[in-house]
């Protein structure tokens, strides 16, 4: 994108001022990644007339992970069937998707290994780009074992981005005080991936101050446990998450109540949760700057879309991409192992000016 700027502001050609040129130059230099292409020569001396300046915004990615969400068939066991206001999550086999201007990539979660996809190996694959079930020879449920933790420590998406100089990068979820005081022996793939890059974890204090979102974005679970936190609406949670994403080159948010409800086979809870989760996503998309941000929604395996089973399904999972580079990113993703490479490629490739 070519930007015409004077010494005080730059414009995208639509007539709207979008900030000071020098401030944006400083921001590009602060990121220091080589992905912001700035012709600094035009701004070395104050100018009294508008001059052409090449400035390309640094692109960012928000990865929204939902545990246990597959693309199922219609029927009485699918809580999406007949559910109002469930877009963009209500996706069905052999039907045109309603993705709210996103691009759907139906994604293989089985990864060439027999058996039902599981959380530990699926999430490890998403967060590393390594086909973890293929390396293990099976799908690993629950928390990552030693072999998976080794994969994460070496290939974590956060670590890859850190080594590439992409910054800031962050995990938006809040952790409770108990996590810091008594670190659990078993940790999720996400926790391991963040830890592999030496990144800080957000706290309940961050949540109170509008700088974090809990995995139950309403905070209802925290309140039931006695935490002094405000109850949040989907709109309020979306505002916080959008603000975090707006400050970062890469942001991850994780939601896993869907998988718990799927295992419980609770249709009423599933329909309530899915409606509110869909609202969160719609409100988030309305608040994120999609001109410079790619929003990627994905899952590790199916579950909640078929409540006739207590187990995970063999269904493909939805990867939906909105915003910047949506077609290119979506076309890159065929299986869970393609998600990390697609993100790294999007955030590290050299930008090119257009029109």
Image (tube, rainbow, N blue to C red):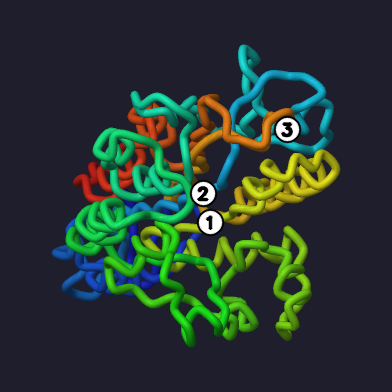
Q: Position of residue 54 (x, y in %)?
A: 25, 53
Q: Position of residue 303 (x, y in %)?
A: 62, 36
* Residue identifier under label 3: 307
**Tag 2 and tag 1, C-beta contact below 8 Å:** yes
Nearest the eye: 57 or 78: 78
Q: Of callouts 3 and 2, which one flags the residue occurring earlier in the amino acid sequence? A: 2
Q: Nearer the viewer, mark 3 or mark 1?
A: 3
Q: Secondary structure at mark 3?
A: loop
Q: Position of residue 271 (x, y in %)?
A: 80, 41
Nearest the eye: 159 or 241: 159
Query: Which disc, if any, is residue 335?
Result: none
Nearest the eye: 65 or 154: 154
Distance between the alpha carbons at the discs numbered 2 and 1? 5 Å
**Looking at the picture, does residue 166 appear above or below residue 308?**
below
Instruction: Classify residue 192 by image quadrant.
Output: bottom left
For the point 18% across and 74% down, the residue is 45
**Looking at the picture, does residue 169 appear above or below residue 311?**
below
Distance between the alpha carbons at the discs numbered 3 and 1? 22 Å
Single out the residue that lies furthest toward the left.
41
Q: Position of residue 177 (x, y in %)?
A: 55, 84
* Residue identifier under label 2: 65
For the point 46% across and 62% down, the residue is 18
Left or right: 39 as drawn, with respect to 88: left
Other residues around mark 2 within 10 Å, as few (<14) / some (14–19) / many (≥20): many
* Residue identifier under label 1: 254
Q: Secondary structure at mark 1?
A: strand
Distance between the alpha carbons at the discs numbered 3 and 2? 20 Å
């Amino acid at each position: 994108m070519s930007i015409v700027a004077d010494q005080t502001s730059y414009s995208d050609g639509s007539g709207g001022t979008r900030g000071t040129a020098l401030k944006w130059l400083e921001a590009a230099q602060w990121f220091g990644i080589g992905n912001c292409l700035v012709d600094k020569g035009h701004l070395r001396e104050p100018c009294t007339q508008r001059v052409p300046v090449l400035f390309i915004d640094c692109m960012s990615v928000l990865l929204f992970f939902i545990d246990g969400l597959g693309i199922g068939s219609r029927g009485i066991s699918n809580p999406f069937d007949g559910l109002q206001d469930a877009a963009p999550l209500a996706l069905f086999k052999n039907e045109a998707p309603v993705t709210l201007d996103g691009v759907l990539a139906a994604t293989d979660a089985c990864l060439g290994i027999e058996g039902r996809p599981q959380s530990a190996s699926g999430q490890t694959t998403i967060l590393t780009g390594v086909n973890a079930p293929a390396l293990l020879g099976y799908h690993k449920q629950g928390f990552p074992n030693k072999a998976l933790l080794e994969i994460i420590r070496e290939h974590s998406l956060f670590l890859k981005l850190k080594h590439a100089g992409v910054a800031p990068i962050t995990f938006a979820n809040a952790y409770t005080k108990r996590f810091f005081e008594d670190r659990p022996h078993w940790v999720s793939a996400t926790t391991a991936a963040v830890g592999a890059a030496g990144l800080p974890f957000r706290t309940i204090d961050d949540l109170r101050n509008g700088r974090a979102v809990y995995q139950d974005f309403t905070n209802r679970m925290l309140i039931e446990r006695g935490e002094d936190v405000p109850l949040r609406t989907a709109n309020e949670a979306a505002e916080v998450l959008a603000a975090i994403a707006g400050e970062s080159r890469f942001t991850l948010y994780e939601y896993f109540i869907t998988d718990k409800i799927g295992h419980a086979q609770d249709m009423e809870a599933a329909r309530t949760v899915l409606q509110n989760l869909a609202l969160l996503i719609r409100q988030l998309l309305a608040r994120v700057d999609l001109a410079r941000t790619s929003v990627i929604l994905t899952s590790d395996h199916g579950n909640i879309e078929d409540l006739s089973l207590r187990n995970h399904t063999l269904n493909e999972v939805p990867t939906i991409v909105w915003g910047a580079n949506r077609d290119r990113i979506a076309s890159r993703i065929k299986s869970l192992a393609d998600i990390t490479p697609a993100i790294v490629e999007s955030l590290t490739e050299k930008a090119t000016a257009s029109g």
